[in-house]
Image (spheres, rainbow, N blue to C red):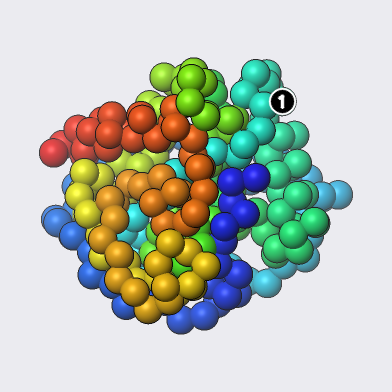
Amino acid sequence: MCAAGVDRSAARGTAPPPLAARITVPRPVARPPIVPRTAWLDATSTREQPPPRYDDRVVAVFIHHTDSPSDYDCADVPRIIRDVYAGQTGAKDWDDIGYNFLVDRCGTIYEGRAGGIDRPVTGAHTQGFNHRSAGIAAIGTFTAGSPVPKAMTDAIARLVAWKLGLSGVDPRGTVRLVSSNSLSRYAAGTAAVLSTVSGHDAAFMTSCPGAALSARLPGIRDRAARIQGR
């Protein structure tokens, strides 16, 4: 599963590393419809977890895929997300699902990690770079040659425009992030200049989010910037 490369220490509340982001005057963007986690996480599946952890703001987004079948019925997505949650909190012993948001092939956006849709929740999705970032998982597998639904990429762009817009961040810009974990592509303490909208593979040794979805990132950045009025 794509979120295998995560920073366990960051997820458990170590202090965020310093970073400098390209910040501009915030532009108001309407929050897209987001299905709350109560729609997919039932009482029998819920695991006891510590209080959410927060950063001061979100200045970068990392795009993932769940590396699971892509030919699902969108009505079955709540079960699929429960399976992701069960795998991460069960076999991997995490305290919650790592992704902040998940997006299905029909363009529906789901809340992932607990803590509040509007708040800068510290996730567990990109090892070394979980602080001041949000993880968005595209549900499916998007390796080379795989179709990437337009409804999905449009929804990701709307989500990116809104989430980064809360901090006035340009989706086409760059951000300086400092790694907190040497298992990432960058040794702990090393500064990395990354796109404000990056694939998981920009920060961790992985093929996630797949070549097909990675090829769509420039379009997602451009569309998100237009939504922000840039």
Q: Position of residue 19 (x, y in %)?
A: 28, 72
In this rendering, position of residue 216 left or right of residue 9: left
Q: Is residue 2 above or below residue 217?
A: below
Tell how many labels.
1
Q: Position of residue 156 (x, y in %)?
A: 41, 35
Q: Position of residue 207 (x, y in %)?
A: 50, 42
Judged from this view, the residue extending furthest toward the right is 44
Label 1 CA crowd tier, 10 Å (few <14, some 14–19, many 20+): few
Q: Quadrant of the C terminus?
A: top left
Q: Is residue 212 above or below residue 12?
A: above
Residue at position x 67%, y 59% in the image = 96
In this rendering, position of residue 187 left or right of residue 1: left
Q: Quadrant of the N terminus?
A: top right
Using the image as rendered, state which of residue 182 and residue 49 is in the foreground: 182
Does residue 127 appear anywhere in the picture?
yes
Residue hosting label 1:
76
Using the image as rendered, state which of residue 216 and residue 42 is in the foreground: 216
Residue at position x 71%, y 54% in the image = 88
Q: Position of residue 97 (x, y in %)?
A: 65, 54
Residue type at tag 1: Asp
SS category of the residue bearing label 1: helix
Residue 65 sits in quarter: top right
Residue at position x 78%, y 45% in the image = 42
Using the image as rendered, state which of residue 76 and residue 27 is in the foreground: 76
Residue at position x 14%, y 56% in the image = 24
Judged from this view, the residue extending furthest toward the bottom is 15
Does residue 35 appear anywhere in the picture?
no
Q: Is residue 179 above or below residue 124?
A: below
